[in-house]
């Protein structure tokens, strides 16, 4: 009985330590993520041969695919990516064309008049929340990162309004660092249509894609799927007759 109570106390203490607020999480390298991805239920279409064929077809169609958010430096790309939530890149580029000359540095955004900034970014939608994120991220970059956009996933995720998708966009397109795969609405839709994943949660989709796509392809692969989703494999009316992936795609909503 005494031994049983001791064991119960130990388990309770271990549980308390694991649940302790602010406890540091271990960093996961890309290799660990790939190993973890192997434990997920693998989509039938995610065989190495088929994945290689899809990557080859994407290279044929979009050899120079890149980020379509206009920017001159990592900080501008960060702001544009925050603005792009629930908004088209085209609209964001229209807004930043006049926004960046008025707010050329992190300091200008950090100490901006919130109401004026809201009106500047209003066309992108959700302008109040985006204003809070932009000003908060700008202040943190000034106060904790010496005015430079951080270069690691762990640091990027500490910025207000920044989740993995935004961090992957900035790290990949601004710094050329393959820290993950950007999973936006296009990547989510197309990876399912191509049967590269059966997951529905963006984090799990990213994890699974990282397990089947070579790391040196992570950045380009994201851009290629986004370009393909905008130009050919559209949500409501996919242009299957124009698609060079048609022969390897067996999506149920093919036209």
Image (cartoon, helix red, strand yellow):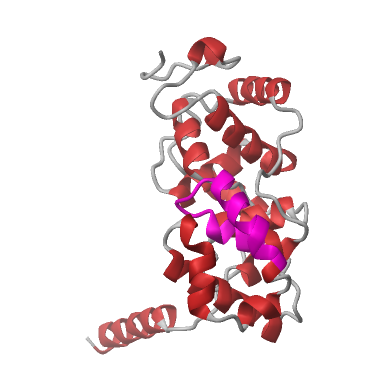
Outermost residue to the left: 1
Q: Nearer the viewer, residue 228 or 21?
A: 228
Please provide percent x and percent y for residue 143.
68, 86
- Left or right, 236 with respect to 31, comes to left
Please provide percent x and percent y for residue 217.
71, 38
Q: Which region of the structure is painted magenta?
A: 78-101
From this view, report whether residue 220 is shown above or below residue 166.
Answer: above
- Residue at image position (62%, 80%) is 110
Please provide percent x and percent y for residue 111.
61, 84
Q: Nearer the viewer, residue 160 or 196?
A: 160
99 in the magenta segment: yes
Q: Is the magenta stretch mostly helix, strand or loop?
A: helix
Q: In which quarter of the image is residue 96?
A: bottom right
From this view, report whether residue 29 is shown above or below residue 12.
Answer: above
- Residue at image position (44%, 16%) is 250
- Residue at image position (42%, 84%) is 20
Q: Which of 136 and 51 is in front in this view?
A: 136
Q: Is residue 164 visible?
A: no
């Amino acid at each position: 009985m005494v031994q049983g109570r001791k064991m119960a106390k130990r388990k309770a203490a271990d549980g308390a330590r694991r649940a302790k607020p602010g406890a540091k999480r271990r960093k996961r390298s890309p290799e660990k993520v790939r190993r973890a991805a192997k434990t997920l239920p693998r989509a039938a279409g995610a065989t190495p041969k088929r994945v290689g064929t899809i990557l080859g077809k994407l290279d044929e169609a979009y050899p120079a695919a890149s980020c379509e958010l206009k920017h001159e430096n990592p900080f501008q790309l960060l702001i544009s990516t925050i603005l792009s939530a629930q908004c088209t890149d085209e609209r964001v580029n229209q807004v930043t064309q006049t926004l960046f000359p008025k707010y050329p540095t992190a300091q200008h955004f950090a100490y901006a008049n919130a109401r004026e900034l809201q009106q500047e970014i209003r066309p992108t939608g959700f302008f109040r929340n985006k204003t809070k994120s932009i000003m908060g991220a700008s202040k943190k970059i000034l106060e904790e990162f010496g005015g430079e956009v951080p270069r690691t996933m762990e640091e990027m995720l500490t910025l207000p309004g920044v989740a993995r998708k935004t961090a992957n966009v900035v790290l990949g397109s601004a710094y050329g660092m393959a820290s993950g795969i950007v999973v936006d609405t296009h990547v989510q839709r197309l990876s399912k249509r191509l049967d590269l994943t059966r997951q529905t949660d963006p984090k799990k989709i990213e994890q699974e894609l990282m397990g089947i796509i070579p790391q040196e392809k992570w950045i380009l692969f994201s851009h290629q799927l986004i370009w393909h989703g905008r130009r050919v494999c559209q949500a409501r009316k996919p242009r299957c007759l124009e698609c060079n992936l048609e022969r390897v795609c067996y999506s149920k909503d093919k036209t």
